[in-house]
Image: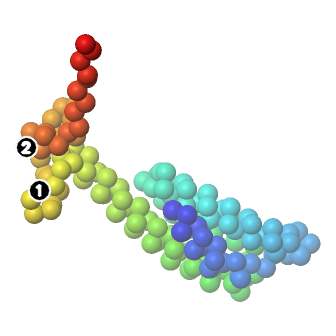
Amino acid sequence: MYQYSRAIFLALKDLVDPAPEHLSPAEARRQVLLASERTIERLAQDPRYFARPARSLFEEIRHLFPIRRQEQAYFAIQSVVTVAVERIAQELERASLSEGRCRATTRKGRPCQRTPLPGSRFCPSHQHLAERTVPLAVA
């Protein structure tokens, strides 16, 4: 997820122009980076309950941009967050498919679709692939 927060930061760092009496440009950029990281971390940890991550991030950092740059900043955030949401959805789907399935592959190289035995990662057909540790006999 690191690449998404960095992509947001790189898209926004040159647009930052805070009021000089409140923040330095370096501090404003640091705030953009930290807010981007928090948003992407929350999105990765709890994607189902984070309804509008792009809007949430924009609302948090919009005061760091001049009015004429806010639309550009929002669309930069939206484009990166959309890609991150799609990637996270793919990962969740892949994880849910692999749960409850045998970990072996078939002869054709496809994942086995059978249900594993209780307490095992493999189905009956692939049980021979399970690592068995045989205790050594003490003489």
The image shows residue 136, relative to residue 5, as above or below, that is: above
- Residue at image point 11% right, 56% down: 106
Q: Is residue 131 left or right of residue 22?
A: left
Q: Quadrant of the C terminus?
A: top left
The x and y percentages for residue 114 are 12, 47
Pointers 1 and 2 in contact (C-beta within 8 Å)? no
* Three-letter amino acid code at the position of disc 2: Ser
82, above or below 126, in the image: below
| Residue behind mark 2 | 125
Horizontal arrangement in the rendering, residue 37 relative to residue 25 (left or right) = left
Q: Position of residue 8 (x, y in %)?
A: 59, 73
Q: Position of residue 99 (x, y in %)?
A: 26, 46
Q: Secondary structure at mark 1?
A: loop
Q: Secondary structure at mark 2?
A: helix
Q: CA distance from mark 1 to mark 2?
A: 10 Å
Q: Quadrant of residue 6?
A: bottom right
How many neighbours does mark 2 have within 10 angstroms: few (below 14), some (14-19), or many (20 or more)?
few
Tell me the residue that label 1 is attached to: 106
Residue 63 appearing in the image = no
* Residue at point 46%, 67% (across, down): 84
- Specify the amino acid type for callout 1: Thr
